Image (cartoon, grey):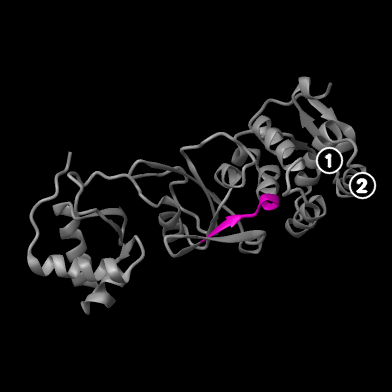
Amino acid sequence: MKQPSGIGKLDRERIAILLRGTQHTISVHEAAVLLGLSREHAAKLLARWANKGWVSRIKRGLYIPIPLESTTADISLEHPWIVADKLFHPCYIGGLSAAEYWGLTEQIFRTLVVLTTARPRNRKPTINGTDFLVHTISKKALFGLNTIWQKKVKISISDPTRTILDFLVDPKLGGGIRMTVDMLKEYLKSEHKNLPLLINYANRLNNSAVFKRLGFLLEKYAADEQVIIDECKKQVTISKTKLDPQLEADKLITRWRLWVPAHWKE
């Protein structure tokens, strides 16, 4: 276990300047500007502090401060949503993480789901003990978001309707189709329910799979939503789609052009 080592007066003063001038993360660029140093000097300084255990490197050129009272440099992320915004901007918190925030599920998830326009090599990184699931989207898909504040930092999160839409685009973001169904049911009986908005969002994405999955699930679990079901039917294309790409599917629901596991057809 890495232990912080001694630090001199000048370094303490510099760290204090960075803590006052940054928001829970410290980049090489910020350090250079705030301390009046070259980028090269700032980078070497941060690397030295990381080696001494006074900051923790979370990616190349980005660090988090280690509390002075900490007895180890191996600390967990105190503000993972803020770190996610720094690492993957432009992005938003979505999937199961957003569902938990909006009360669409009572389960608590260790993995933080982030949707971003970036294309990171590692889509399941673990950073200082926090697991991330990173999903790439197009720039035009950055809509249906709310802004929340964490420690004076603005964070984007999918609104409840966009959260459901993302589950219909990729059930994996909802932990699979079974959990997606549970959260859809919760959405339908919650104050967040807004099916016309969901249709509007789906049209903006122009993703036929969303309409097939939504129409099929509404028909199965909310048959009284006939107007929305009919809207979904209008968008069904000739191509066939799986209800959940991660599951074996051997039964075709022809009216929805949707492959489902056998027990789902009943």
Q: Is residue 142 above or below residue 53?
A: below
Which quarter of the figure has residue 14?
bottom left
Q: Of the residues shown, which amino acid type is indicated by label 2?
A: Val
Q: Which mark is residue 227?
A: 2
Q: Residue furthest bottom?
A: 36
**Residue 244 in sight from this viewpoint:** no
Q: Is residue 231 left or right of residue 114?
A: right
Q: Which residue is mark 1?
A: 215
Image location (x, y in percent) of residue 56: 25, 53
Q: Quadrant of the N terminus?
A: top left
Q: Is residue 157 magenta?
A: yes
Q: Which residues are magenta?
A: 155-162
**Residue 23 in sight from this viewpoint:** yes
Dot 2: what SS? helix
Q: Is residue 235 left or right of residue 47?
A: right
Image location (x, y in percent) of residue 265: 82, 24
Give the residue drawn at x 31%, y 65%: 27
Q: Residues within 10 Å of mark 2 (few under 14, many from 20)?
A: few
Q: Residues within 10 Å of mark 1 (few under 14, many from 20)?
A: many
Q: Of the residues shown, which amino acid type is indicated by label 1?
A: Gly
Image location (x, y in percent) of residue 93: 54, 52
Q: Is residue 221 above or below residue 2?
A: above
Q: Which mark is residue 82?
A: none
Give the residue drawn at x 73%, y 56%: 205
Q: Is residue 198 left or right of residue 229?
A: left
Image location (x, y in percent) of residue 66: 24, 53
